[in-house]
Image (cartoon, grey):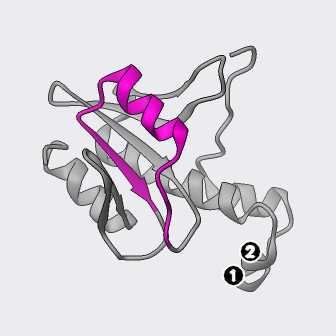
Amino acid sequence: MKSPKVYLRDTGLLHALIGIADRRALERHPKLGASWEGFVIEQAILRAGSRHACYWATQAGAELDLLLSRGGQRIGVEVKYADAPRLTKSMTVAMADLGLHRLCVVHPGAARYALAPGVEAMGLEALLAVLASGGGR
C-alpha cells in the first residue's frame, strides 16, 4: 500500500474530535462503523498484545482489519458494523494468502455462526474469549 491505515484506537478521543456528544449522536453519525472498528481493535490488542498485531492489505484491494499471531497461529479479525455480516472476497483472499488458522468477523450483536470453514461471525465478547483461550478452535 502507498499509505498506512490509521486507526484511532481511543474511541472517546475520536468522538470528541468529530463532535459526537452522546450515543444517539453516534448512532446517526457516518463514522459509526469506524468508531466500532477502532473500539474492537483496541479491545483485541489489549487482550492479545500489540507486539503481534498488524493491518494487512494487498495492491489488488483485499484487506484485513487485524492480523494477530497467537500461540503459533495466525488469527484474522475483520470488523463489520452489521447485524448479519457475510463472507467477502477480501476475507477469502486473506484466509488463503495468509494461511489463517481462524478468521473472526466481529459484529455488534451476540449471534455466533459459521460463514465458511475457519471463518466465524461473532460478537466482541466471543472474540475476547477466543483470544483469551489462545485463539484455537
Tell whether position 82 is magenta: no
* Residue 25 on image: x %, y %: 79, 79
Report the magenta residues as a range. 84-106
Find residue 134 and name its label. none
Neighbor class of circle 1 (other Cα within 10 Å; few <14, some 14-19, many 20+) is few
> Which one is in front, 40 or 106?
106
- Vertical relation: 134 (above or below) 109: above
Residue lying farthest right?
Answer: 19
> Which one is in front, 92 or 109?
92
Find residue 26 and name its label. 2
Tell me which residue sits at (22%, 53%) in the image: 130
* Residue 98 on image: x %, y %: 37, 22
Image quadrant assignment for residue 124: bottom left
Find residue 23 and name its label. 1
Image quadrant assignment for residue 115: bottom left
- Vertical relation: 33 (above or below) 98: below
